Structure formats: C-alpha cells, structure tokens
Image (cartoon, grey):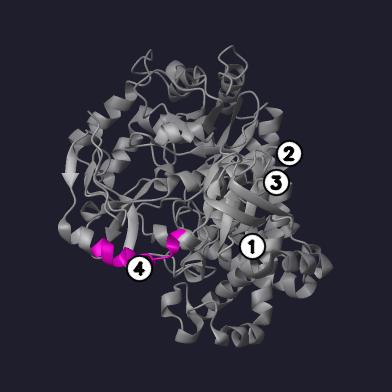
C-alpha cells in the first residue's frame, strides 16, 4: 500500500521513502530549522496570491474585473468563460483587491509525429576554428549535420551565464542566472564589428591545443577581444533598440556582471550599498561604470543573434537547471524569495549513499507565490526562447525539493512541497506561446502522481536504457528515449570497463559495488559476445533504443564517436568534469563511420510502425 507522508503547514514532509520503498523519519531538529527558514506567510497571502486557472474553470471569486494583458477589460462572474484568452492578466474585485490571473491551456505544445536527434555537450564540441571551446557556430554546424541526416532536434547542455571572472564555473548546472546566456559560447569572428578589429585568431585557436577545456584562459582571451570589438563598434542603433526592448531585466543582469568584475562573483561580499538591486546608490554606480554595464548587455545581444542563427528552423531543446548559484545574479535579484542557509540536493539512494548537495539555494514556496511566480516564469521563458524545446532538469522539483540545512549532511535534509499544479500550468502556458515541446527529467526515485501529472500537462517523460527494467519496446510513447545522460557511463565506457576503472580511481565506490553496477548495466545489452568490439556494443544499444515507440529518440555524440569517458562523474572533485573535449572535431563528425551507423539506425527507428498513440 502506498504511504503518503505527513506534510505540515510549512510544506515540510515528516518522512520520506527511498528507492526500496523504505520509510525514513526526518529529524525534529531539521524540521525546526526549516520552519525557521521558511517562516510564516502573511495572513492576507491567499487574498493576493496569483490565481492560476484554465478557460472554463470555476473561481472562488464571484465578481471581478479583469484587465487582460492586451489591455482588453472583461467582467467575470464565478468562472472563466471557455473563450477567455490565455495569458497573464490582472484581476480586481469589487472590494479593491488586485491579483494576478494566469490563464493556461493546461497542456504543453507537442509537434506531430516522431523525431530523433543528437544530445550535445556544446562546450566539448569543438571545430578547427573554435577558441578552446565549442561555440554557437559549432552548434550551427551540428544542427546542419543533423538536418542532413534527417534528425528533428538537437538537445544541448545549459548555456546559462556564470560570473564573468577568473575561476569560471565549469558545471552547466550551477549558473549565475537562468535568464541569460554565457558569452564564452560566442564565435568571436562572427560578432558584429569583428571585421574591424585584429582578432589574433591564431592565439584563439591555440586554446584548443590542450587536452582539457580551460575556461579561464578561454574567457580571458575572448573577453579582451570582445571588449575591443565593443569599443570599436558598439552595436549601433540595432543594439540600442534591442537593449531598450529588454528593459530592466537586462539592465539588472548587466549591472550585476559589471559589479562582479570589480567586487567578485558573490554578491554577499560586495559593499553593503550594492547588495540590493533597488539600492539608491546603485544608480550612481551604473553611471560611473556605464561602459562596462553596456558591454555586458551588448554581449547578450550578440549571443541572441548567434543563437538565432545557430538554431535555424530546427528544434533545439534547451536545458533548465534545477537552480542557480547562491551568489549569482538571480540570487541577487530575487534574494527576498530565496531560503538562506539551505541548499537543494537529494537524499541517499542506490547511486549515492551519502545523498547529494547541489549547492543551489531553493525558492521559498509561499514567497514564490507572493512574487506572482515571476522568478519561475522568467526562467522558463528565457530558457525556452528561440529553440522550440525545453528539458527541465529534475522535474520532480516542481513537486518537492530536498532541502539541506547549512553545515549538515545531505542525508539530514527533508522534502519541502511546491505548488506543482500552478507551476505545471505556467510551463504549459509558456510552451504554448513559444510552440516549444517540454521534457521532464524524471529519473531516480519518482513519487506516485508525478508522472501522471506530467502526462496530464503534456510534459514528456525521460526514459533511459541504463535505468529502465522494461525493454525499450515497452516504453511509453509520450517520452524522450535515450541510452544514457551526462552523469552516466557512455556505451564504450561501460563495455570496455573504462568507466568502472575511472570510478575506482576517484573512489566513488568499492570494487564490489562498481562491478555489481557494471554487470547490471551490461544486462541491458543482450546478444553480444563478451569480446565484441566497442562499435558492435554501440550499434546494439542504439538498435535497442530504436525499438522504443517514444515520440523522441535521443543519442549522444559521445556514444556515436565511441567516447570512453562520460562528461561528469557525480561526487568527484578532482576529476575534470565538464571539461573533456569530444575526440572528433565538428568538421569530421558527418564522415565518422560509427556516427553514420547510429544516425541511420535511429532514422529507421522513427519511420517504422511504432507511432505514439493520439493524445486525448
């Protein structure tokens, strides 16, 4: 029988179930500490918090005037008409209460038919013209290759910005913001005005000579040249118009980035007068440092131009991390909505007996509502923009998040509940507006009701060969199917034992645990002789994947070129995670024999008779 944990008025679960369905009680001290952090909402929150509804829904408000986002004024009486416009409106009751009304279609947009595509770690996907790191011109080349092969999408790692200083954050999943892109991905030679500056291209290309991706050296070189281009060209009227259109959101980002260059990447350590975006002293700072602020805004304009050119007319699924750095721009902007002294993580499980601390501060649920869901809306909208697809990392976080108090073990945390119905409806609204499909990363321990809610809202599930007990042919149609992820072994790494050996080197498990885990994954590749070459193992894995009836079939470039090493080994600090270049250059990918075989297998897989059932 399913056990439902007791949740208190702060949204804290008193217990949790592990992957083996064993129940664990949360320590009273943890609950008490999290209650202090969350605090009590104001008494009138329910009278001013946003209403999230769908056309035809009954409302708890009898009569109200609604000012729609297009300026139209409507009267409602007890329910929303079936033809009520979708969007973000303002509702005002006869008593004078004003609150946001968010009207959602309830379901995400989904394209017709089935598609296959490439999962790409863009930073690793270098070409002969790259400056040490894969960039947006390389993404354009991969997209063209994919289109020529008949692929329907490309899935990329998060491209969100980090602090623009030395000590560049390497993990794409701990950005400073989830609303702006990282200028390290710019192809410098294609920035407007680059033709008027000596780019010293040979020095830039030499950054690719190393065996690892050196983000500090790359950013130092790119920043110096980009700054020269900016002062020589400035973007002209096109940039000025774009900057004005972006408004205060862009200005806040550019201001944060400018302050970071002088005072460091954690806003907590800045001079007190700069620690709040609304500080009166901030305007004086911006006036004194206007050129640097404009430079960081200009970088985002250049990124917007290059990203649009890179994606073309193909769906590019962008990845939304579960959180952002506590000292970063989003944390600075929304500091009153964040939980201080708490990080997001995961409880102990079969893959990590100590639990995990991901280093991101969580949003306090009631404060998120009180902020009209704006932090969430902006993050979803910005990450979805221009690509036609969104992958939500750890989608279970829309339902509950594992909060880890400061100075405590990740095992000493507790789950805190979120308003999942509202959040999913907002995702559906943004998906509908952007005509963007949505995939939810629902791997690991998934509590009852999550996948059902995802299906109801048109969010595709995420199914992996390395995780699923059922054969791929039995996987759901409403899903993205894949073999592995950036955190799990590549086919070649698993087959050769290289991945287990590397884990042993970094102490992520005992010999017995690692061998047991490897054997369990090898069982997912039946029908191969023990001495079969890597190429046969890769082909076999993708033939199994092609049997899935899922709407999306995704293969990694790492697997397609026989890469032994995975991009990231969770729990390791000495390993160069997120810094391993793909061993095959972008120009050589189309002619790679194994990659050609993989693309042919998946192309055949999406044209067979296993089509998704029609959506109800």
> Decide: marks 4, 1 in contact (CB < 8 A)?
no
Q: Give the magenta-colored segment's residue range.
A: 33-46
> Dot 3 corresponds to which residue?
310
Q: Quick one: quadrant of the C terminus?
A: top right
Mark with earlier residue (3, 4): 3
Asked whether, in this view, residue 492 is left or right of residue 117, the answer is left
Pair 2/3: label in front: 2
Alpha carbon distance from label 3 to label 4? 38 Å
How far from the left and from the top, in percent, is residue 588? 63, 36
Alpha carbon distance from label 4 to label 1? 43 Å
Asked whether, in this view, residue 165 is left or right of residue 250, the answer is left
> Dot 1 corresponds to which residue?
203
Q: Is residue 166 above or below residue 478?
A: below
Neighbourhood count class around disc 4 (C-alpha, 10 Å): few under 14, some 14–19, many 20 upward:
some
Pair 4/1: label in front: 4
> Decide: marks 3, 4 in contact (CB < 8 A)?
no
């Amino acid at each position: 029988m399913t056990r439902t944990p007791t949740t208190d008025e702060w949204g804290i679960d008193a217990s949790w179930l592990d992957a083996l369905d064993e129940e664990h009680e949360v320590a009273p001290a943890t609950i008490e500490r999290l209650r202090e952090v969350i605090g009590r909402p104001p008494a009138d929150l329910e009278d001013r918090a946003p209403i999230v509804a769908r056309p035809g829904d009954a409302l708890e408000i009898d009569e109200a005037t609604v000012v729609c986002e297009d300026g139209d004024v409507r009267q409602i009486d007890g329910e929303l008409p079936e033809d009520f416009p979708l969007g973000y409106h303002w509702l005002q009751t006869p008593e004078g209460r004003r609150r946001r009304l968010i009207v959602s279609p309830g379901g995400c947009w989904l394209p017709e038919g089935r598609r296959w595509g490439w999962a790409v770690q863009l930073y690793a996907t270098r070409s002969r013209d790259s400056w040490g790191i894969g960039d947006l011109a390389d993404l354009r080349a991969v997209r063209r290759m994919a289109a020529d092969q008949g692929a329907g999408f490309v899935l990329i790692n998060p491209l969100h910005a980090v602090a623009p200083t030395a000590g560049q954050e390497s993990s794409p999943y701990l950005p400073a913001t989830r609303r702006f892109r990282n200028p390290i991905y710019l192809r410098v030679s294609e920035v407007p005005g680059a033709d008027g500056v000596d780019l010293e291209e040979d020095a830039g290309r030499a950054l690719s000579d190393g065996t690892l991706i050196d983000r500090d050296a790359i950013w130092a070189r790119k920043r110096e040249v980009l700054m020269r281009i900016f002062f020589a060209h400035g973007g002209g009227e096109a940039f000025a118009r774009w900057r004005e259109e972006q408004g205060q959101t862009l200005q806040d980002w550019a201001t944060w980035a400018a302050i970071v260059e002088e005072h460091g990447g954690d806003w907590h350590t800045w001079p007190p007068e700069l620690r709040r975006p609304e500080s009166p002293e901030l305007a004086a700072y911006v006036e004194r440092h206007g050129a640097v602020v404009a430079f960081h805004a200009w970088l985002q304009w250049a990124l917007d131009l290059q990203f649009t050119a890179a994606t073309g007319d193909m769906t590019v699924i962008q990845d939304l991390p579960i959180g952002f750095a506590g000292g970063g721009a989003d944390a600075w902007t929304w500091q009153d909505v964040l939980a201080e002294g708490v990080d997001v993580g995961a409880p102990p499980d079969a893959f990590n007996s100590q639990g995990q601390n991901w280093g991101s501060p969580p949003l306090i649920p009631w404060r998120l509502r009180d902020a009209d869901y704006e932090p969430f809306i902006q993050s979803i909208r910005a990450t979805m923009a221009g690509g036609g697809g969104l992958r939500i990392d750890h989608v279970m976080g829309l339902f509950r998040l594992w909060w880890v108090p400061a100075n405590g073990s990740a095992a000493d945390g507790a789950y805190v509940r979120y308003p999942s119905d509202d959040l999913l409806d907002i995702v559906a609204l943004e998906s509908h507006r952007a005509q963007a499909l949505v995939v939810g990363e629902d791997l690991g321990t998934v509590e009852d009701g999550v996948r059902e809610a995802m299906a109801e809202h048109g969010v595709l599930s995420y199914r992996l060969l390395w995780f699923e007990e059922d054969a791929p042919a039995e996987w759901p149609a409403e899903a993205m199917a894949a073999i592995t992820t950036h955190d799990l072994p590549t086919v070649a790494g698993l087959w050769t034992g290289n991945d287990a050996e590397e884990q042993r080197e970094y102490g992520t498990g005992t010999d017995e645990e690692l061998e047991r885990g490897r054997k369990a994954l090898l069982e997912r590749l039946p029908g191969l002789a023990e001495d079969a070459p890597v190429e046969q193992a890769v082909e076999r894995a993708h033939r199994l994947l092609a049997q899935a009836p899922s709407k999306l079939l995704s293969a990694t470039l790492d697997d397609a070129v026989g890469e032994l090493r995975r991009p990231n080994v969770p729990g390791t600090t000495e390993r160069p995670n997120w810094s391993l270049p793909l061993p095959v250059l972008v120009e050589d990918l189309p002619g790679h024999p194994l990659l050609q075989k993989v693309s042919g297998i998946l192309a055949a897989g999406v044209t067979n008779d296993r089509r998704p059932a029609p959506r109800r």
